[in-house]
Image (tube, rainbow, N blue to C red):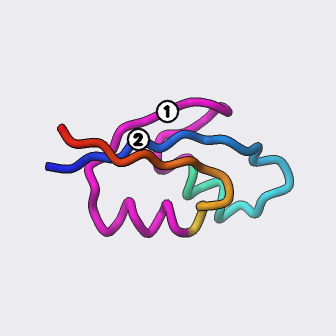
Amino acid sequence: MKTVKVTLKRSLIGRTKRMKKVVASMGLRKINQTVIHKDTPVIRGMIHKTSHLVEVVEAEE
């Protein structure tokens, strides 16, 4: 199954509560923290909402 590596690259200061919740639900807390998720439509939607804050690298497991 495909996986994606998601890295938080921008600060959450000044962002809306909703955006902070989306980033937190992906498991990201600090800048430059990376998490690995399965490539599902739910995760893709979260990435789409926060695309200006995160960096995504597709990986195959």
- Residue 3 falls left or right of residue 48: left
Residue 42: which quarter of the image? bottom left
Give the amino acid type for the residue marked by disc 1 in the picture.
Thr
* Residue 33 painted magenta: yes
Query: Residue 5 has which mark?
Result: 2
| Label 1 crowd (10 A; few <14 / some 14-19 / many >=20) | some
**Real-space CA distance between mark 1 and mark 2, rounded to the nearest whole angstrom:** 6 Å
- Front-most of residues 42 and 58: 58
**Residue 50 drawn at (x, y percent):** 60, 61
As drawn, which residue projects farthest toward the right? 14
Query: Residue 53 has which mark?
Result: none
SS at circle 2? strand
- Front-most of residues 50 and 17: 50
Residue 15: which quarter of the image? bottom right
Q: Closer to the N terminus: mark 1 or mark 2?
A: 2
- Residue 27 falls left or right of residue 50: left
* Residue 53 painted magenta: no
SS at circle 1? strand
Q: Are marks 1 and 2 in contact (CB under 8 Å)?
A: yes
Please name the residue that numbered disc 1 is placed on: 34
**Residue 58 drawn at (x, y percent):** 35, 48
**Residue 29 drawn at (x, y percent):** 61, 35
> Which residue range is magenta in the image?
24-48
Residue at image coords 65%, 65%: 18
Residue at image coords 61%, 41%: 8
Residue at image coords 49%, 33%: 34
